[in-house]
Image: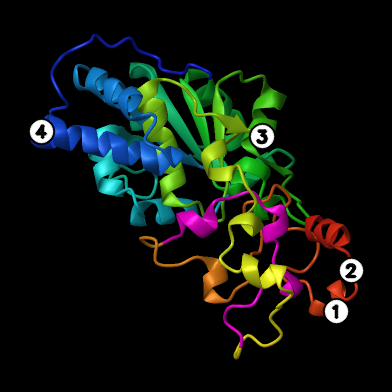
Amino acid sequence: MTHVQPAQYTKTRKIMSINNLSRREFLKKCRDMSALVFGSTIFTNEIAEGFVKLSAAERPQVIFIQSQCCTGCSISTTYGNETDFIDFITNIIRLQVHPNISFSQGVDYMALIDEVANSGPFYLVCEGSIPAGMKEACIFNDVPMYDYMHTLMNKAAAIVSSGTCACSGGIPASNQNVTGAIPMDEYMKRTGVDKPMVKIPGCPINPDRLMGTVAYIVATGKLPELVDGKPKQYYGDLIHNQCGRYQAFNQGHYTTSFDKEKNNCLLKNGCRGPVVFSDCPTRRWNGKVNVCIESNTPCIGCIHDDFPFNSPLYLSEESFEDTSWSEMKEKMKK
């Protein structure tokens, strides 16, 4: 695993003072976080040790910055899910700068970013893609975002790409992309930024994935196990394999009427679950209340690197008549 923790924290026997937690309560929170992030309690002690060290030092600073995006990922994050956003920014990190919730504007806002970036180590959460072909499409303090991000990224201890736009270009980079929008990793490659980075795709992101990943990095000083740059625990298996309608798929029961059939497989209605790696069916949304497929909506593949694709979001049932499983998956990708 890549080490990204910028500061050395002295050990202490004092259990985390935030919220005046007892030792039992503190360990329970660490166990819950381990289960939330990794689906297992195996990392409880490691996370606990990390937060005990943090209690003897200042919580790490975090800067959120937005480029070409709709701010939907930030809105999703503030609503929270299993992880509460207020608890996250008051007990785990120091959220110093966020364009959606900052009281500072204009010159004061820019001064705040500069102050944090120059005061010591910080983590940078990037939302949105960067216009590389039309730099004036996104201006930040009279400077093209393309130029500004290079300086800010080079000062960061680690970078988190938040949302599909930041991870793979997303909607700004789709179809006739006149701005030349590119994702963060491509931008870093073009401009020579060499920093640890993790991708958290989704349109919008699931709050747990962003906050869980940042919390793990903060507590352990390491990136979690990654697959294609994404946390394996969140993006390690296909949606199709975890789907609550998998049995209907095995039995060949496909939805032909959305009004009458609420439990049949949505594959022939254009569901992209067979080509999207994500834990959506088990992670769920809105306090674990629901997920797209349970709302009788085919997965549109918002986490896929090629989202929003060149074809219609939902492929017609006629597209899959007498089509083999391998051919069907290939159509999903395209």
Q: Residue at x 35, y 60 (%)?
A: 287
Residue 128 shows up from this direction: no
Image marks 3 and 1: residues in contact by CB distance under 8 Å:
no
Q: Name the image quarter holding the C terminus.
A: bottom right
Along the viewing direction, whichever of 294 and 305 lies nearer the viewer: 294
What secondary structure is marked by label 3? loop
> Mark 2: which amino acid?
Thr
Lower sequence index among marks 4 and 3: 4
Q: Which residue is mark 2?
A: 323
Against 128, is 195 above or below?
Answer: above
What secondary structure is marked by label 2? loop
Colour scheme employed for the rendering of this structure: rainbow
Q: Which residue is mark 1?
A: 318
Question: Which of pointers 3 and 2 indicates the residue nearer the eye?
Answer: 2
> Mark 4: which amino acid?
Ser
| Magenta-tinted stretch | 261-285
> Mark 1: which amino acid?
Glu
Q: Residue furthest bottom?
A: 260
Q: Position of residue 88 (x, y in %)?
A: 29, 41
Lower sequence index among marks 1 and 2: 1
Image marks 3 and 2: residues in contact by CB distance under 8 Å:
no
Disc ID at residue 228? 3
Q: Is residue 175 left or right of residue 109?
A: right
Q: Residue at x 67, y 53 (%)?
A: 276
Q: Is residue 61 left or right of residue 165?
A: left
Q: Which residue is mark 4?
A: 22
Q: Mark 1: give few (<14), some (14-19) or many (20+) Cα within 10 Å.
A: few
Res 307 quadrant in image: bottom right
